[in-house]
Image (cartoon, rainbow, N blue to C red):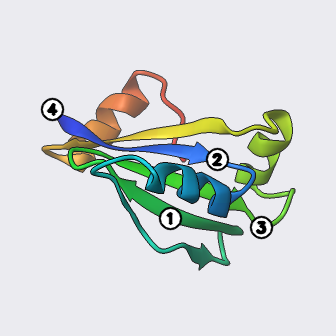
């Protein structure tokens, strides 16, 4: 069972500019960027209080995020992440319904 939307993942062309835009909004907390070199991107979280926004900037054009950004140069929705009661049950159910694993 889905409990809530945990975060929305966005790919952005400029992580610093995106964070600066969100930092201007009242009541929003902007996290520090960090790199996931093995995944080839930088990311940071924006805390809206009841949900997070995950901002990702690709480090290379040949990464998954890089290809998504190349197709959508101004940025794009990458994923939605939900909290569930039982992750194994949710995964099985999604696969049974034809979802593609990441």
Disc 2 target residue: 11
Disc 4 target residue: 1
In three-dimensional space, the C-alpha distance between marks 2 and 3, rounded to whole angstroms, equals 11 Å
Among the two numbered marks 2 and 3 on one chain, the one whose residue lies closer to the N terminus: 2
Q: Position of residue 89 (x, y in %)?
A: 22, 40
Q: Position of residue 100 (x, y in %)?
A: 54, 35
Q: Does 42 sit left or right of 4 as displayed?
A: right
Residue in view at x 48 percent, y 29 percent: 99
Q: Position of residue 46 (x, y in %)?
A: 41, 56
In three-dimensional space, the C-alpha distance between marks 2 and 1, rounded to whole angstroms, equals 11 Å
The quadrant holding residue 20 is bottom right
Number of dots carrying numbers: 4
Disc 1 target residue: 44
Residue in view at x 64 percent, y 63 percent: 16
SS class, disc 3 = loop
The quadrant holding residue 93 is top left
Disc 1 residue crowd, few under 14, some 14–19, many 20+, Cα 10 Å = many
Disc 3 target residue: 59
In three-dimensional space, the C-alpha distance between marks 1 and 3, rounded to whole angstroms, equals 14 Å
Among the two numbered marks 2 and 1 on one chain, the one whose residue lies closer to the N terminus: 2
């Amino acid at each position: 069972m889905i409990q809530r939307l945990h975060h929305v993942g966005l790919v952005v062309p400029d992580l610093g500019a995106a964070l600066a835009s969100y930092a201007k909004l009242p009541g929003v907390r902007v996290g520090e960027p960090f790199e996931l070199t093995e995944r080839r991107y930088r990311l940071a979280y924006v805390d809206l209080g009841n949900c997070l926004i995950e901002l990702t900037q690709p480090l290379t054009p040949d990464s998954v995020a890089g290809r998504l950004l190349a197709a959508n140069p101004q940025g794009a929705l990458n994923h939605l992440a939900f909290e569930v009661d039982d992750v194994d049950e949710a995964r099985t159910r999604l696969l049974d319904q034809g979802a593609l694993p990441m």
